[in-house]
Amino acid sequence: MSWALIPLNEEQREIQRTAREFAEAEITPHSAAWDRDSYFDKSVIAKMGALGFLGMMIPEEFDGLALPTTTYVVALEEIASADASIAVAMSVHNSLPTQMLLKWGSDAQKARFLAPMARGELLGAFALSEPEAGSDAASLTTQAVRDGDCWVLNGTKAWVTSGSEADVIIVMARTDNPKERRGARGISAFIVTPDLPGFKVGKKEDKMGLRASPTVQLELVDMRVPAENLLGREGAGFTMAMQSLDNGRLGIAAQAIGIARCALEHATVYAGERRQFGKPIKEFEAIQFKLADMATRIAAARALLYQAAAAKDRGEQITQYSSMSKLFASETAMWVTTQAIQIFGGYGYVKEYPVERLFRDAKVTEIYEGTSEIQRIVIARELYSRSP
């Protein structure tokens, strides 16, 4: 069941089918075990790359599929409905490092990284946050100092999705003078590979949800980054990061919708099978109302996401709409999974049934790539910036 209000074209339906069949065969049978063991199966990432799912918006000249954002979010929802941990790796890779390289990378950087990233041979990650710089990302303190033909980086990055498994990481660091800070204008972006001297994977977070997705700290100690690995111009890193998060928030919205849809599907089946007071609980109005509201909110979230993605494909400025989509979809996922657990009753509270995992996975969509509070600030700010 998709409940899509906006019709998909034949290409989108075919990619949706491919993603769904792949998810059912390669992900769904393992998702509970991966969650239990906090296991990241990188072979699945390689298989996704072979199908083109890691280069969906990369041009064909770099071995990508050159597909629009609307098609990408359709595929991502299918992966997320099977396992949100795999989906977040796909989302970060497609929407942050690859798109930053495509938009701001030099010809040499594109030639070196984009094609293997599109093929799934290199997994991408994004390192902006720090232990003391979360929502206030511009307060980051990781320092980069030019030394001949290298930049020397020192600092700790936090909450890096796929950070322990990634082959290409876009790292934000300060390049301004510590005695004359320039705020957001003093931040630059660097292309970092784990083979660089001074690169170390630090603490792995023991998370409530998305347990099959490794979230780690990166410790950069006198890490020497070749000067040619500066992405874009010096001092433009924060602006690049914020623009890229517009893309990332669409991916998180698709992930949240996939989680919610899966919860609704399980709840619908369970309500038809579970009998109380002599009949299936789906015949009770209280359950019917829950299912109706769950389906309605998911359809609304998907419609908003598709419209935001279409606006991006038209080249429009989408900051407000990507925040709206991420905000509404993430809160929908949290609400829908809560209702699913209520429908399952006591069984929904135990790990034997999947809605418990879906509930845990849903929560983080309200937090990462900008909390719900930050999304509301962005939306309100955009309202005022567009006022006559």
Image (tube, helix red, strand yellow):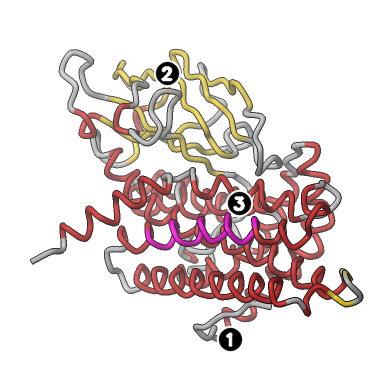
Q: Secondary structure at mark 2?
A: strand
Q: Residue furthest right?
A: 278
Which residue is under mark 2?
Answer: 155
On screen, residue 301 versus residue 264, left or right, reads left
Q: Secondary structure at mark 1?
A: helix
Type of amino acid under label 3: Ala
Which circle's residue, 1 or 2, is located before the other in the chain? Answer: 1
Which circle's residue, 2 or 3, is located before the other in the chain? Answer: 2
Which circle's residue, 1 or 3, is located before the other in the chain? Answer: 1
Mark 3 surroundings within 10 Å by alpha-carbon count, few (fewer than 14), some (14 through 19), many (20 or more): many
Q: CA distance from mark 1 to mark 3?
A: 30 Å
On screen, residue 149 versus residue 52, left or right, reads left
Mark 2 surroundings within 10 Å by alpha-carbon count, few (fewer than 14), some (14 through 19), many (20 or more): some
Type of amino acid under label 1: Glu
Q: Residue 357 at x, y = what percent? A: 73, 49
The residue shown at (30%, 27%) is 139
Q: CA distance from mark 2 to mark 3?
A: 30 Å
**Region in magenta:** 324-338
Which residue is under mark 3?
Answer: 362
Q: Tag on residue 10?
A: 1
> Does 327 lie within the magenta span?
yes
The residue shown at (78%, 60%) is 344
Q: Residue 18 at x, y = what percent? A: 70, 72
> Does 284 lie within the magenta span?
no
Q: Residue 73 at x, y = what percent? A: 53, 66
Type of amino acid under label 2: Gly
**167 and 142: which is toward the camera:** 142
**371 and 98: which is toward the camera:** 371
The residue shown at (40%, 23%) is 132
Image-quadrant location for residue 259: bottom right
Q: CA distance from mark 1 to mark 2?
A: 48 Å
